């Protein structure tokens, strides 16, 4: 499959299950390859990644559930709970972090670009997220990108003993594809692209 075809194949898949043919070792190899080979400003490699499987994956989604139980109005919690169940039904969760100590040290090292490093760090994690999402899709693994940070950050860092300077940016929850993605609409190219010759 060409790279363009892979990009087109990547979609948000909400109906995910545990029927994944790849082993954890195979998945880890893909995750490491993708993140290591994703670009970062000045090759600063600010992205940090934690992958949760099995009980750790369940534990993570229970942290999200219990955190939201305190925040979501009671009447609305059933829908939230069902959504969290659908993520917990997946095979694993990739947590994307950005190392804030590294960002700060880059700002000190390169004062001329200091104000840009936080944004460049955000770009880097986005690139890595997209690349991994696409690489998983190539292996017929479905995923969706979630953002329960920052309300879960402290509990997640404590539970998995992660450095507090690792700032959680996104959660890519993945598993077997149990139902295909919904239809996607596209805005008019004319409103989006310009070309000058
Ligand atoms: C930066 C970014 C943030 C997103 N945040 C969420 C999110 O918090 N929850 C969610 O269910 N989907 C999230 N999505 C998925 C988008 O809704 C989805 O990519 C978009 O509707 C296009 O659909 P597709 O992924 O199937 O191409 C996010 C996507 C991006 C790129």
Image (cartoon, helix red, strand yellow):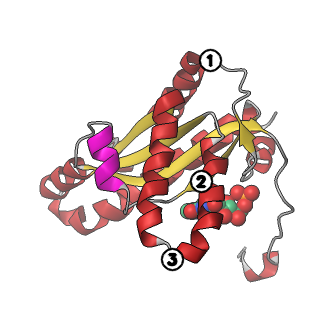
Q: Is mark 1 within 8 Å of ligand 1?
A: no
Q: Is residue 163 above or below residue 108?
A: above
- Can you identify the residue that label 2 sits on? 84
Q: Residue at x 67, y 20 (%)?
A: 22
- State how far apart marks 2 and 3 are (Cα): 16 Å
Of the two numbered discs 1 and 2 in the rendering, the one whose residue sits closer to the viewer = 2
- Can you identify the residue that label 1 sits on? 23
- Report the side of 70 relative to 16 (left or right): left
Instruction: Report the span colored magenta.
Output: 153-159
Specify which label sits upstream in the sequence, 1 or 2.
1
- Report the side of 180 relative to 49 (left or right): right
Q: Is residue 38 visible?
A: no
- State how far apart marks 1 and 3 are (Cα): 39 Å
- Residue 95, given in percent of the width and then of the height, sits at 45, 44
- Report the side of 158 relative to 13 (left or right): left
- Residue 185, given in percent of the width and then of the height, sits at 83, 70
Disc 2 and disc 3 in contact, CB within 8 angstroms: no
């Amino acid at each position: 499959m060409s790279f363009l075809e892979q990009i087109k194949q990547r979609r948000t898949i909400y109906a995910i299950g545990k029927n994944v043919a790849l082993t954890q070792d195979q998945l880890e190899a893909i995750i490491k390859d993708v993140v290591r080979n994703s670009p970062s400003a000045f090759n600063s490699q600010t992205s940090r990644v934690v992958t949760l499987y099995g009980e750790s994956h369940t534990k993570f989604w229970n942290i999200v559930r219990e955190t939201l139980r305190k925040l979501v109005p009671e009447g609305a919690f059933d829908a939230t709970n069902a959504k969290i169940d659908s993520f917990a039904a997946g095979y694993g969760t990739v947590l994307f972090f950005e190392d804030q100590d590294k960002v700060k040290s880059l700002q000190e090292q390169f004062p001329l670009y200091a104000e840009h490093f936080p944004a460049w760090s955000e770009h880097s994690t986005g690139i890595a997220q997209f690349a991994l999402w696409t690489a998983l899709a190539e292996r017929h693994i479905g995923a969706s990108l979630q953002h329960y940070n920052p309300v879960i950050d402290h509990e997640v860092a404590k539970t998995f003993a992660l450095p507090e300077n690792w700032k959680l940016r996104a959660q890519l929850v993945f598993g077997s594809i149990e139902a295909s993605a919904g239809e996607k609409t596209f805005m008019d190219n004319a409103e989006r692209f310009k070309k000058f010759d």
